[in-house]
Image: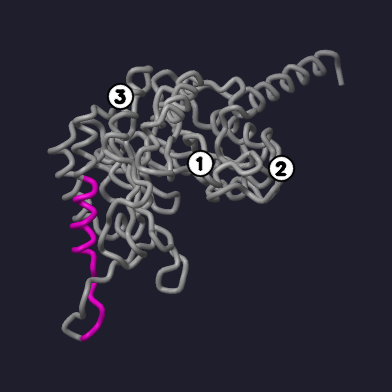
Amino acid sequence: MSCKNVISFVVILILGLAITSTPQAFASSQITGICYTTYQRPETYLTSASDQKLLRIAAAGAGWVNLRVSWSQAGYTSTDIEPNFATPSDDAVAHVIRFCHQHGIKVLLSLMVDFADDNAGGTWHWWGQIAPVAPGKDAAGKAADGWAEWFDAYDKYVLHYAALAQSAHADMFCIGTELISSSTTHEKEWRALIAKVRKVYSGKITYQAHITEYRAVKFWDALDYIGMNGYWKLSDANNPPITELLTSLKTIRASLQKWQAALPAKSRKPILFTEVGYQSADGAATTPWARGSLAGLPHQALQKRCFDAFKSTFAGQPWVAGVFWWGEFPPGEAGVDERGAGHPFLGKEAKENFEF
């Protein structure tokens, strides 16, 4: 190899290493935030410990917080949706919004439905499989479809928080999270709900779709952002190199961009990654959606590698509105970071040189 060729090869190698090891920061126009939630008690957000965690989030440079509130139904066939043992009080939600604003952070208030019993009916289900059954029987003596009753309950839930978001001046409002069985089959009911929310809340509105759901949702045109929770499997390996992570994410990026570009103009809203997270443990890129800490050995460097790969792939893309990283919690949250192997990332390597 000639001296000139050697020099060219070295330059290309150095540039390649820079691309894979130095993630691009999200553009100033892109939303960059941290998800914040609790399953402790209704007043947890009113504690000084919670305020201190929010100050840490502000110090990290986060421009936004995705503040999660959940109500529960008894099981996947239930039609009633009510506050649960940990649902934050309205005063607590309003306090977080005010506190964040005082420290330069905007707030997305987002809603989700959980189950009091994931195994009701004898089999485990999650909120994407809700299949409500109405009380009594239909004319043929069979259990009746309970979607009308479910949407009555869900509308009350959403509109309660739409009013709270308006009065507390939340900067964005999310009307639901990964409700696949309803969002992909009941377009009319969702459009009616969105119209009701618009009459109550004047800010931007989104919906958080699952990675298997977003293509089948038909009401994106009625919202301001295409919300998406980005928990894609990136590797089968416990400790994949960043080159493998980048290859997987670039394939995902190409698919998303092609899909979004093919939407009708009225539906072609920017994609907002409403949740993206990786645990600080072996296997983080295999099951990033896992709840609770992974059984693998703690691995902070892998968590940082996954964050860096995601940022390198999606930062600066004009069709991407931004990202909310999952997630941080008030002190004392049970099960979210056992052995330091869970999703929280402040104080770990993923926070080092964390670019917002």
Residue drawn at point x = 31 percent, y = 29 percent: 95
Tell me where residue 16 appears, x and y as whole percent: 69, 24
Label whose residue precedes the other's in the sequence (2 or 1): 2
Residue 242 appears in the picture as rendered: no
The secondary structure that dominates the magenta segment is: helix
Q: Farthest left residue? A: 199
- The residue at which mark 1 appears reads as 333
Q: Which residue is mark 2?
A: 239
Count neighbours of disc 3 (C-alpha within 10 A) and say few if under 14, some if 14 to 19, many if 20 or more. some
Q: Residue at x 62, y 22 (%)?
A: 352
Q: Is residue 167 magenta?
A: no
The type of residue carrying mark 3 is Arg
Q: Is residue 240 visible?
A: yes
Look at the image and give the residue range highlighted in magenta. 141-158
Tell me: 186 left or right of 275.
Answer: left
3D distance between C-alphas at marks 3 and 2: 41 Å
Crowdedness near tag 2: few (<14), some (14–19) or many (≥20) residues, C-alpha within 10 Å: some
Give the spatial CA distance, label 2 vs label 1: 27 Å
Question: Element under label 1?
Answer: loop
Q: Position of residue 220 (x, y in %)?
A: 28, 44
Residue depth check, mark 2 versus mark 1: number of the one nearer the observer:
1
Q: Quadrant of residue 135?
A: bottom left
Side of 217 relative to 347 (left or right): left
Residue on which the image places disc 3: 98
Nearest the camera: 23 or 97?
97
